[in-house]
Image (cartoon, grey):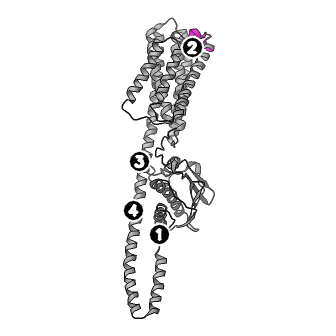
Amino acid sequence: MEFLTYLFNVVNGIMTVYIDCILFSTFADKRKFRLYKPSLVLITIIIISSLCFIKNSFLNLTILIAAVFANSFLYKMKWYNHFLLSAAIVFLSSFAELGTAVSISVILSQDMATLKTGYYFIIGGTFAKLLIFLIVAIIRFGKHTKFYGKIKSTWLYISFLPLTSIILVYIIIDYINKIETNPTMQLLTIGALLLLIITNVMSFYVFDKIYENITVEQNLSIANELIKNQKTQYSVLYESQNEIRKIKHDLKNTLLGLLSEIKNNNYESVAKLLETECNNLSSNYNVIITGNNIIDTIISSKKYYAESKGVSLNLDIDNLGEIYIDPIDLSVLFGNAIDNAIEATARVSGGEPTVDIHIIFKNSNLILITNNPIDKKIDIQNLSTTKTNRKSHGFGILQMKSLTQKYNGDVFFDCDEKNFKTTILINNLKQVNCDTNYNKRVL
């Protein structure tokens, strides 16, 4: 029995550190330094040694709190959150252990002193660890904002495992009391409990990896979208440069013609030629001027794209000031929203194929609103791509939501029978937008 107690303390210590790491990594990134793993091993050894060899409960708790607090410094977070998160995990652990002890005491009609010894101690500790593990897992997956489609249902299925495990532990508590005279069965039962913990941990690990893969896939899609937008911008700039060269060449010839007419005192011909050239410049001028080079480039490129689809853009800009948002982020955000509006408008038969675009500065926020006609009402709670290759597309809304979160903003959708409206709200404060780590903000 003593061997099993030591074994449980080892598993208990490892699980304690693992659960702490799950909670801390939910809110902050790991510090990248060579001693990260050795530090984690040292903290684990300290906790296991305390559980195995120190019998004073108060001293044990003190060492545990100190170890948890030390573990928090392996993650990047603000100083006060080292205290808050450490206190939270200690409180949750204590609450789980106390609740477990009271429950088992009521079920088996045993006093607290008995529950701290033998098989009761191991089973109670196992139940408490499963309970705190479930709580922390729920917190972590609650922070995963990129869940969509099948991944939501997968999490639902997997969440039944720790819940079922807790019920099984309750059943085993009653069962182990009945096999008190059979040490072999008790040993097998304890082994099954430890395997139950390992199974829960491995299931959680696999699901977390699934989420990481989804995140990587989304980031790759964003990267591809960035490249696509950059290519579009370069294409527009190239066309603009060619247009400028053509205008420069034509202007030179025009000036030579004007000079010749002036020398011949043919002023009426000069006036007609100037009027013709002014009209040509007005009709051929296709560059959008908003006062911001990035927005000019985005809107100009989307104007060409809209014209190729037979769609016109109606642009309204109010109080456009200095923009601190990363140009590529801005290009992806605005580009996705306008592309979606153009493509939806192009599918509508009849009516005037026009997309209304409003860009507004208000209370240090940059707001983009696109309004486009639709042929049928859209369920804004279940937006999906209409493109044939769904595996390669459909990330536009995820990209927009991810990037707006980087700037403490959001994306809103509104729809009636005839119109679809997208509103992008992003914070334009310089100090906020200096932080480029938006996947996991430092607390």
Where does label 1 land, which residue?
287
Above or below: residue 380 compared with residue 240: above
x and y percent of residue 302 in the render? 48, 63
Q: Amino acid at mark 3?
A: Leu
Front residue (pair 209, 76): 76
Q: Residue 175 occupies which quadrant of the picture?
A: top right
How far separated are the C-alphas under marks 3 and 2? 52 Å
Q: Position of residue 92 (x, y in %)?
A: 57, 25
Q: Which badge, 3 or 2, comes first in the chain's sequence?
A: 2
Q: Which residue type does callout 4 highlight?
A: Tyr
Which residue is disc 3 drawn over?
A: 220
Are the residues tagged 2 and 4 within 8 Å (C-beta)? no
Residue found 48% across the figure and 58% down from its top: 335
The one nearer the camera, 333 or 440, is 440
- The boundaries of the magenta stretch are 106-114
Q: Secondary structure at mark 1?
A: loop
Residue type at mark 2 is Asp
Mark 2 nearby-residue class (10 Å; few <14, some 14–19, many ≥20):
few
**Other-residue count near label 4 (Cα within 10 Å), few / some / many at <14 / 14–19 / ≥20:** some
User: Which numbered disc, 4 or 3, marks the residue that appears first in the sequence?
Assistant: 3
Foreground disc of the pair 2, 1 = 1
Residue 174's tag is: 2
Dot 3: what SS? helix
Q: Which residue is mark 4?
A: 234
